[in-house]
Image (tube, helix red, strand yellow):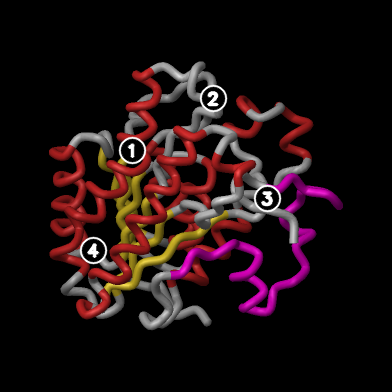
Amino acid sequence: MSESLSGRTILMSGGSRGIGLAIAVAAGRHRANVVILAKTDQPDPRLPGTVHTAVAEIEEAGGQALAVVGDVRVEADVERAVASAVERFGGVDIVVNNASALNLVGTEELSVKRYDLMQQINSRGTFLLTRAALPHLRKSDRARVLTLSPPINLAPHWLGKFPAYMLSKYGMTLLTLGWAAEFAEDGIAANCLWPQTTIATAAVVNLLGGEEAASRARSPQIMADAAVAVLGLPSERTGETFIDVDVLAETGVTDLSPYGGGDDPELDFFVDPR
């Protein structure tokens, strides 16, 4: 299912920690070049990792990496990241839209400022990064856009839970599925990837229930392994929203115990029991 990522250049938003970092390091093990656009230039006592430590981990894993300190909401920063990728590695083969803001409150409790932040990072940032990379994706012989966003689940219990966050994440998905159709003749594949369960990241520990929630969450490595598999798919596999466990099952991986989460892992947002 997976082709080699060796020598391919990935442009990623975020990636200093969590799922993005796990994907970037996994790509590094396959000898990919990874360019990370992220704001985390200096360490934060509340959160581990910076864009610079991420680069060190990718290179230690066997890849080449470049840090671009910037904000995915700022068009000039995004264009600088693309230009840096082209200057250092000669082009862009893959865009990974990873950066995302999370705010799980209802409409009345959510300030306009925080609403705008989510839309700007999630859907607008996804648009800016992909749009800026398009001229170079067209030149790649295996171009792909991978967006970390959920399937469009219109069940009322998801539509009404936190509409602003839902809109920002579904916006990422709709853009990506739209690009799959818009650029099919250009040979640019576009897919989404989402975890079946919560993932043990700082966001889960800090926002979703602490260590107890983390104990029912799987390791970021499950998303990394699934992402590597999706990035190696033939270009005909486009316009799909993948769930990590389904991707792994397609590669023959059915034992999920190495990824943790216990016997009853917590389902992620927008994912219903099967």
Image location of residue 156, percent across then percent down: 60, 44
Front position among marks 3 and 1: 3
- The CA distance from mark 3 to mark 1 is 25 Å
Task: Give the residue at mark 1.
Answer: 38
Residue 262 is one of the magenta-drawn residues: yes
Of the two numbered discs 3 and 1 on the same chain, state the one appearing first in sequence. 1
Q: Amino acid at mark 4?
A: Val
Q: Which residue is mark 2?
A: 106
Residue at the image position 77 percent from the left and 48 percent from the top: 265
Residue beneath disc 3: 197
Q: Using the numbered discs, state the Cα–Cα distance from disc 1 to disc 2 in whole angstroms.
A: 28 Å
Amino acid type of the residue tagged 1 in the rendering: Ala
Tell me the crowding category of disc 3: few under 14, some 14 to 19, or many 20 or more residues within 10 angstroms, Cα based. many
Mark 3 → mark 4, Cα distance in angstroms = 31 Å
Q: Amino acid at mark 3?
A: Thr
Rendered residue at 33%/72% (across/down): 189
**Front position among marks 3 and 4:** 3
> Could you say where residue 101 lies in the image, as x and y percent from the top left?
44, 34
Is 271 left, or right, of 10 in this rendering? right
Q: Nearer the viewer, mark 3 or mark 2?
A: 2
Residue at mark 1 to residue at mark 4: CA–CA distance: 17 Å
Q: Nearer the viewer, residue 157 or 202?
A: 157
Q: Residue 9: where, in percent of width, then height?
A: 30, 64
What range is drawn magenta here? Answer: 240-267
Q: Residue at x 30, y 52 (%)?
A: 35
Q: Earlier in the sequence, mark 3 or mark 2?
A: 2
Mark 2 is on which residue type?
Gly
Q: Earlier in the sequence, mark 1 or mark 4?
A: 1
Q: Tag 4, which secondary structure? A: loop
Disc 2 packing (10 Å; few <14; some 14–19; many ≥20)? some
Q: State the mark number for residue 92.
A: 4
